[in-house]
Image (cartoon, helix red, strand yellow):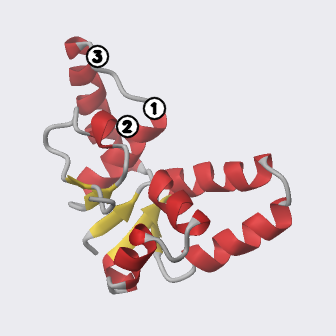
Amino acid sequence: MKWLLDTNVVIHVLKDIRGGLANRLAGVDPSEVCICSVVEAELYHGATKYGAPARRKSALEGFLRPFASLPFDSPCVPVYARIRDRLEREGRVIGGNDLMIASVALTHDLTLVTTNTGEFSRIAELRIEDWNH
């Protein structure tokens, strides 16, 4: 695997299946792409929160099916702690879920695909790409 999709990328693709992000993703072997449990949780929360949850969940499940899902688990914890400590000392804190997503990417040596480059760029060792640009 090479790429970890952030929540916002999946949302963009689901909203615009013929858009630039969807086209870029279609050109990548699904075995090279994964998501993580934190992204899944955010996506399912969004599908449940807004109208037509059954339809949204079905579309989400269909989209996610080809991709492996990595957990935020014990190997990610020290990475999370180290980065959170540094960001807090620097006064550049990011959201807890984003920090967990970044920790999964770093633990598994993946590039995070996101449109939220401003927040994730605070983690110098994290490789990020915005497939919109």
Residue named by callout 2: 99
Figure check: 19 above or below 101: below
Residue 118 drawn above or below residue 21: above
Q: Residues within 10 Å of mark 2 (few under 14, many from 20)?
A: many
Residue 97 x, y percent position in the rendering: 47, 38
Q: Is residue 123 left or right of residue 46?
A: left
Q: Nearer the viewer, residue 45 or 14?
A: 14
> Would you say 79 lies left or right of 116 here?
left
Q: Which residue is mark 1?
A: 96
Decide: few, some or many residues near mark 1? Use Cα within 10 Å; few <14, some 14-19, many ≥20: few
* Extreme residue toward the left, this view: 125
Which amino acid is tagged 2? Leu
Label 1 element class = helix
Kind of residue indicated by mark 1: Gly
Mark-to-mark CA distance, 3 and 2: 12 Å
**In terms of secondary structure, where does tag 3 sit?**
helix
- Amino acid type assigned to the residue bearing label 3 in the image: Glu
Q: Is residue 79 above or below residue 131?
A: above
Q: Give me the residue at 57% from left, 80% from top.
A: 65
Tell me the quarter of the image containing the C terminus. Answer: bottom left
- x then y, percent, for residue 48: 78, 52
Along the viewing direction, whichever of 91 and 16 lies nearer the viewer: 16
Q: Position of residue 115 (x, y in %)?
A: 37, 50
Q: Of residues 89 and 3, which is closer to you in this image? A: 3
Where is residue 46 shown, x and y percent of the image? 69, 50
Identify the mark nearer the N-term, 3 or 2. 3
Report if the CB atoms under discs 2 and 1 are less than 8 Å apart: yes
In the figure, is residue 61 to the left or right of 133?
right
User: Who's the residue at 32% across and 82% down the image?
Assistant: 28
| Circle 3 residue | 88
